[in-house]
Amino acid sequence: MTGTTSLTETELRYQLPEIITMALPGEKAAAILARRSEAIPPSLTCVYPVAIAKAEGAIIEDVDGNRFLDWVGGVGVLNIGHRHPKVVEAVKKQENDYFHAMINILTSEKYIALAEKMNEIVPVKGFKKRTFFANSGAEAIENGVKVARAYTKRPNVIVFSGAFHGRTLLTTHMTAKKANSVGLGPFPDGIFRVDYPNLYRKPAYYTDEEAVAYYIERIKRAFDELTPANQVAAIVFEPVQGEGGFIPAPIEWVKAVRQICDENGIMMMTDEVQTGFGRTGKLFASSYYEEAGCAPDILCTAKSIAGGFPLSAIVARDEIVKGIGGGLIGGTFGGNSVSCAAALATIQVIEDENLCERSLELGAAYTARVEEWQQQYKEIGDVRGLGGMIGVEFIKDRLTKEPAPELVNALIQHCVQNGLIIENAGTYGNVVRFLAPLVMTDEQLEAGLAIFENAIDALCTKLA
């Protein structure tokens, strides 16, 4: 193997993955990873032998000069890629003026401009909308629940199996996987869980239509068995479950949820922390719902909102947001001016570069290739998703659908050693998620597919 010449950041954006060290981690990365193991809590786990030095677009370069194709994107944070030039420009311009103005003390025009833009583009039910900002996805969900409870004057919230809503005390409890909350209780009350419509793992012998009806009925039964409907403030769900395994909600189920909410005075709240900003082929997955006449009442989003800067947003119609009293929402850093400037630039990039359409193209190309592999390798059980948010579920047996998390862990390591960063998801850790930056080139996509295919060929069993 030979070394590479130093690349400018602009050139890096268009490079292909390449490993130049004899093994990973390289010498410099190994030293940083050793410092990591001594300096931070071991619960902040990481399986990737990579210490980042620079990144552009969909390419990461580590401290040893190895280049990796990024199909994780900060777990959905980098839809417009690493360090988009227009975001860099907007951030530098804002930093020349001021860094921060707390909205409860000073009015930043950037905060207002971003709120106006979000009110224009976010698909929630109602004509006049209002937006406020927090720092993270978990904070957005907490604030959405606050808003729903304040407006409805009700205490309870319905969530779903497979859900992931964050790591604060409330959102940890709203999250389904209890491995995420071992030893952290007691938890806030008022959270009730029902089955999410996972059609790949639907009840045996059900058609998809019968399964959707079954999952709708589970919500209605919750009003008898868990909490009366007149005590429910919100039904909260992810349009495509993220950590749960990239499982899209069937549109007929969403329509039924909308009807249930309307009939019972319940807020329908979508968690678009991971699905927002072009990831699913529209600016928001709830845009599909708006077209079908079932837009949510409250939408919470974060991750790709600001191109890598910490920011989240809560959007609802005027009457709902006005139902919460003074001083009950807000925070020191929510809507930081630099983050707002980055978000305005990010939205402009998505619109100018047609990244919603690009998301559909990338998702279709990726899905088509994986479906070809599905006909060749018995461990590929399901391929599903929406737009550029695709999950591949790996199993041990197609009849029993027994999950294969060990295989997925091996695939991750095989890929990273060859320059491709992928990540697992799912209740059982047996799903490979596709969250590549939407600015990835066709050549980079092909390079990544080749690495992924080689890993599958090396580790999976070919069908006879």
Image (cartoon, helix red, strand yellow):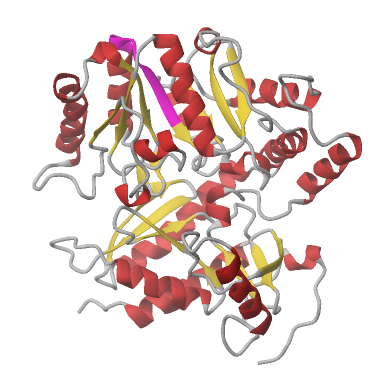
Q: Is 105 drawn above or below residue 10 in the view shown? A: above
**Rendered residue at 61%/31% (across/down):** 134
Residue 287 visible (yes or no) = no
| Residue 233, x across and y down, in percent | 36, 17
**Rendered residue at 67%/41% (across/down):** 306
**Quadrant of the image containing the N terminus:** bottom right
Magenta span covers which residues? Answer: 262-270
Q: Which of 124/54 is in front? A: 54
Q: Is 352 drawn above or below residue 313 in the view shown? A: below
**Rendered residue at 31%/77% (across/down):** 460
| Residue 197, x across and y down, in percent | 25, 39
| Residue 412, x across and y down, in percent | 44, 71
Q: Which of 384/300 is in front? A: 300
Q: Is residue 201 left or right of residue 56?
A: left
Q: Is 445 drawn above or below residue 168 in the view shown? A: below
| Residue 37, x across and y down, in percent | 55, 70
Asked where in the image residue 267 lies, by quadrant, the reply is: top left
**Rendered residue at 33%/36% (across/down):** 186
